Image (cartoon, coloured by chain):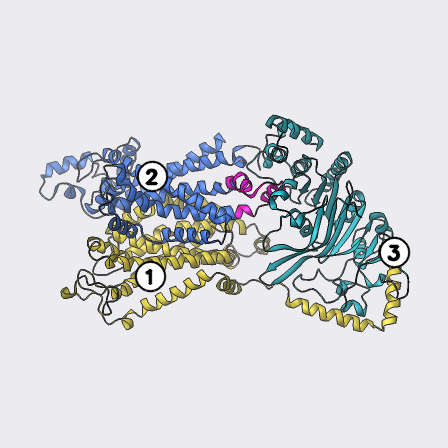
């Protein structure tokens, strides 16, 4: 994808901990085109949030991006001066977090917190204009009584409303890319549906690209057109949602899908055996091999490359390695 | 949701491959088991107080050094009579106010007594005053704190009592108690214990309040375990890390309180000596003989500083959210 | 909000009565007949009888306590045995000096302690952090009178080292008293700011594209200073405690000095009066800090919070 809005190439993020190096993101490449919505899926600790944090420059110590490039609109975020990068953050790229209860500053009114982003990035705007714009965005975000809510503190709002405020904050500067890190995980199921609906609607109206980080394949199926499956810091499978749901290739993706309860199936719910490996000590060979029900001898000592069983569908698994002499499809 | 057809095809691919590789399922299980065993070594180890202390010594050099300094000081104070040949109270008017020299490492005071010797012996009072009232007040504080956190009927009484004690400026209350009881070393212990318990009680109470809501305490209650058993067997051990920290940080407070009381004339009485008393006795000779002031002040500073460093280090590893 | 303040005020009343009671009981058990302390051995019996009557000395202790409480509420703490003046007027004379000393020391400690704490937290583990924290820890680790004596020695002839007749007299005692307080404030500001900087909303603020300075000043500082407000209340207590030492050392005729003099001359009403007054000031200070805290924190100020 040459004209992608966001191009992450071979990104490496490492945590230099007391007990050793943790390669939280280990050579991840992701593309997102303008206006596209892309899902990043995986169990917790697989590096999906860390990919987003590296992109936003929000890594906590001792974490550090130590390899790869992140091109946004043709500019490399990893090589940019912090000052220039801050001009993009909250403006062209914005982010929604998992914890609506704690992500807003308890001692500042929600209106001012949203207005702050606007005043920071749209210098020409006066305070009154900014306030009116915030109230307008609050209404778009489905916050009832927007003018009244503007002056309230976070503790006066419910979790769902707070997440709507977060969305308003992220959308107020009309960003090109919105990163949503498990935006609905902490919410009730009914609220979850509303929030996803709202995000979908805003995305379509504004033409914003969305990077949806989630462990919930249901959310991806509803929301995204393309999908990356991550495991232990690496992308294991990627392709369009349609293709992957129809023709699942990687045993890990298959495991994830079979772990979703299905009302029609009488079969016992599947679970992937074992647990996510300690990131301090990854197995030699394929990272998934000890938990994979199809693992072969070579999986235990060689790392699989990325193979393309069908156009645009990539899998990191030896099962899909083209036979020698066989032409790449 | 997943297509089972697909799963079947994955399995078929795998089957073909294993035949090709002649990789039996036993070999496969062995390989998995090997990896899982390796994994086990990298599981996060449970943090015991011991491993936490080891971490602190490795990472917080100031705290580790402070521990060593305290050990040396305690050793010197306890074996004072082996380390110096002078008598702390022997008056020698021929050797008044001598500056530090090889014979008198820290000089002599206005009565010709060796200051180094007096610091070692005076350290006994300061050390005892640091440890004993702190220990007593913590025992009282822990019991009252747990009771007021666990038995709601007694909460108001105990906490108002603590409020009253904490309302006083501590030196003033200690002063009044010493005035009432009379100025002796034993009474310093009593005075400081009477004041110190309130702070501990508050900390322990708030911890008890949050612990009593936890599942393991509710489980014990549901099983019919008696109140007192719950308090001492389930709640107390969980307060232990913050109590260790509190203990370390309360000792310097007590040492400074004794020094202040001695300065005000209601603490340690001559001819006994404590570091605080030595400093305040130096008042008249500071101009001409600054060593009479400097060395006992340094003794207090080093011991209290070391205890504070150690306490801060312990808090970082044992009780990161306590303040 | 108003309800909270009223409730908070009501809670202090039993504490205040408890304070008076505790001091009264402790000082009642001290051996020695007050009248002997007051006028020496040779006094006529009828004089003693008359004075005992007017001072309620013949009544049981609880009646005397009731009288004492009643008088104290009306601002009457009795008459000093030694100075033969009403305790209230002695305190009224001395308190402004103590207050000036404490306020100067407090201002000094905030002006130094809060910025030092902020710099230490923001530049954690830098040289500045280690220097500030070392200095702060020394401030709380050395007895105030040691520092005071050393300063008196160094500045003898440059600055006044005793008495209280000009603002210049305030410099050294305020420095001694303020160093300790600044140390406490700096340490608290640092740890509280470090904790706040880990909070999720700081990440939100950074994700907005705010510069680090704006994140700290605009988002972290207000939250991290909330515990510092509580600390300031506790500080009133330690400042008044410390004033006892500093006033004695620098011969400042404040309330602390009055209390020490009362002990040395076994002047019971004066001791009772000064201790109760000081404690009442502390209780009032804590109350003020609590109210200030509830105004500063919208989670308490705005009702409807959880």
Q: Which residue is identified by label 3?
A: B4
Q: Which residue is identified by label 1?
A: B127
Q: Chain of mark 2?
A: C
Residue occupying the point 18% across, 44% down: C33
Residue occupying the point 45% across, 63% down: B64
| Residue A133, numbered label | none
Q: N-terminal of the two: label 3 or label 1? A: 3
- The residues tagged by marks 2 and 1 sit, at their Cα atoms, a distance apart of 34 Å
Q: Chain of mark 3?
A: B
Q: Colour of chain C?
A: blue
Q: Nearer the viewer, residue A176 or A238?
A: A176
Q: Indicate yes or no whether the magenta region holds residue C209.
A: yes
What is the crowding at mark 1: few (fewer than 14 residues within 10 Å), some, or many (at least 20)? many
Q: Is residue B1 visible?
A: no
Q: Which chain is yellow?
A: B
Q: Which residues are magenta?
A: C195-222
Q: In the rendered view, does A103 fall on the left or right side of C226?
A: right
Q: Position of residue B152 (x, y in %)?
A: 49, 46
Q: Indicate yes or no whether the magenta region holds residue C264.
A: no
User: Circle 2 — which element?
Assistant: helix
Q: Position of residue C34 (x, y in %)?
A: 18, 42
Q: Colour of chain A?
A: cyan
Q: Is residue C19 visible?
A: yes
Q: Position of residue A313 (x, y in %)?
A: 84, 53
């Amino acid at each position: 994808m040459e004209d992608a809005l966001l191009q992450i190439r071979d990104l490496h993020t490492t945590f230099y901990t007391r007990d050793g190096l943790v390669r939280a993101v280990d050579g991840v490449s992701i593309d997102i085109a303008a206006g596209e919505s892309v899902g990043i899926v995986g169990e917790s600790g697989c590096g999906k949030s860390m990919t987003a944090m590296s992109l936003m420059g929000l890594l906590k110590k001792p974490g550090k991006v130590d390899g790869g490039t992140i091109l946004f609109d043709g500019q490399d975020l990893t090589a940019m001066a912090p000052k220039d990068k801050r001009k993009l953050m909250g403006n062209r790229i914005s982010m929604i977090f998992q914890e609506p209860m704690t992500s807003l500053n308890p001692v500042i009114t929600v209106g001012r917190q949203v207005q702050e982003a606007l005043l920071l990035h749209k210098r020409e705007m006066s305070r009154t204009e900014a306030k009116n714009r915030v109230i307008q965005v609050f209404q778009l975000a489905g916050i009832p009584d927007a003018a009244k809510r503007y002056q309230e503190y976070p503790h006066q709002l419910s979790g769902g409303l707070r997440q709507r405020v977060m969305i308003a904050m992220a959308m107020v500067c009309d960003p090109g890319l919105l990163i949503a890190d498990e935006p609905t995980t902490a919410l009730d199921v009914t609220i979850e549906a509303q929030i996803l609906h709202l995000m979908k609607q805003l995305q379509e109206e504004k033409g914003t690209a969305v990077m949806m980080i989630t462990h919930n394949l249901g959310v991806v199926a509803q929301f995204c057109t393309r999908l990356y499956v991550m495991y232990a810091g690496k992308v294991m499978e990627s392709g369009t949602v349609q293709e992957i749901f129809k023709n699942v290739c990687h045993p890990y993706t298959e495991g994830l899908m079979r772990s979703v309860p299905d009302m029609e199936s009488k079969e016992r719910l599947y679970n992937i055996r074992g647990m996510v490996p300690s990131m301090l000590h990854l197995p030699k060979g394929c990272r998934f091999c000890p938990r994979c029900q199809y693992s072969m001898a070579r999986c235990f000592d060689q790392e699989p490359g990325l193979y393309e069983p069908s156009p645009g569908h990539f899998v990191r698994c030896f099962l899909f390695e083209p036979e020698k002499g066989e032409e790449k499809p | 949701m997943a297509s089972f057809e697909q799963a079947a095809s994955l399995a078929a691919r795998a089957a073909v491959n294993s035949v090709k590789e002649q990789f039996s399922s036993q070999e496969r299980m062995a390989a998995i088991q090997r990896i899982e065993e390796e994994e086990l070594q990298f599981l996060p180890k449970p943090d015991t107080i011991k491993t936490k202390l080891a971490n602190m010594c490795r990472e917080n050099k100031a705290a580790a050094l402070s521990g060593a300094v305290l050990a040396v000081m305690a050793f010197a104070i306890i074996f004072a009579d082996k380390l110096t040949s002078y008598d702390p109270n022997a008056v020698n008017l021929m050797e008044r106010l001598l500056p530090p020299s090889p014979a008198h490492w820290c000089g002599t005071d206005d009565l010709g007594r060796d200051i180094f010797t007096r610091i070692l012996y005076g350290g006994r009072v300061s050390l005892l005053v640091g440890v004993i009232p702190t220990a007593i007040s913590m025992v009282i504080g822990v019991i009252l704190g747990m009771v007021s956190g666990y038995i709601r009927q007694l909460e108001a009484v105990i906490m108002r009592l603590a409020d009253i004690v904490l309302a006083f400026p501590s030196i003033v209350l200690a002063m009044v108690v010493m005035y009432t009881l009379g100025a002796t070393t034993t009474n310093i212990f009593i005075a400081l214990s009477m004041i110190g318990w309130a702070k501990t009680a508050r900390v322990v109470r708030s911890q008890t309040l949050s612990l009593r809501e936890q599942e393991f305490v509710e489980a014990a209650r549901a099983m019919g375990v008696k109140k007192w058993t719950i308090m001492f067997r389930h709640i107390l051990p969980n307060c232990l890390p913050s109590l260790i920290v509190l203990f370390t940080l309360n000792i310097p407070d007590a040492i400074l309180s004794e020094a202040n009381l001695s300065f005000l004339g209601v603490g340690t009485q001559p001819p006994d000596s404590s570091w605080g008393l030595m400093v305040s006795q130096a008042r008249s000779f500071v101009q001409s003989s600054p060593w009479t002031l400097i060395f006992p002040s340094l003794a207090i500073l080093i011991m209290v500083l070391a205890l504070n460093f150690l306490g801060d280090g312990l808090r970082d590893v044992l009780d990161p959210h306590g303040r | 909000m108003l309800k909270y303040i009223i409730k908070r005020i009501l809670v202090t009343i039993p504490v205040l009565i408890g304070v008076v009671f505790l001091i009264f009981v402790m000082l009642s058990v001290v051996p020695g007949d007050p009248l002997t302390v007051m006028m020496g051995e040779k006094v006529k019996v009828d004089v003693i009888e008359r004075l005992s009557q007017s001072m309620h000395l013949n009544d049981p202790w609880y009646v005397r306590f009731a009288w004492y409480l009643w008088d104290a509420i009306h601002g009457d703490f009795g008459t000093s045995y030694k100075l033969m003046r009403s305790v209230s007027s002695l305190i009224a004379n001395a308190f402004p000096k103590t207050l000036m000393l404490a306020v100067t020391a407090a201002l000094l400690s905030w002006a130094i302690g809060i910025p030092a704490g902020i710099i230490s937290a923001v530049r954690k583990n830098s040289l500045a952090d280690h220097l500030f924290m070392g200095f702060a820890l020394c401030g709380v680790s050395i007895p105030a009178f040691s520092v005071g004596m050393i300063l008196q020695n160094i500045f003898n002839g440059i600055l006044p080292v005793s008495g209280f007749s000009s603002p210049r007299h305030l410099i050294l005692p305020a420095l001694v008293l303020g160093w300790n307080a600044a140390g406490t404030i700096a340490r608290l500001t640092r740890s509280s700011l470090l904790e706040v900087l880990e909070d999720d909303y700081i990440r939100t603020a950074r994700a907005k594209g705010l510069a680090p300075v704006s994140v700290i000043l605009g988002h972290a500082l207000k939250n991290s200073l909330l515990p510092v407000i509580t600390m300031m209340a506790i500080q009133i207590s330690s400042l008044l405690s410390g004033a006892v030492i500093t006033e004695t050392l620098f011969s400042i005729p404040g309330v602390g000095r009055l209390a020490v003099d009362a002990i040395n001359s076994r002047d019971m009403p004066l001791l009772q009066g000064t201790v109760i007054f000081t404690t009442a000031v502390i209780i009032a200070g804590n109350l003020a800090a609590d109210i200030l805290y509830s105004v500063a924190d919208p989670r308490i100020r705005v009702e409807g919070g959880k």
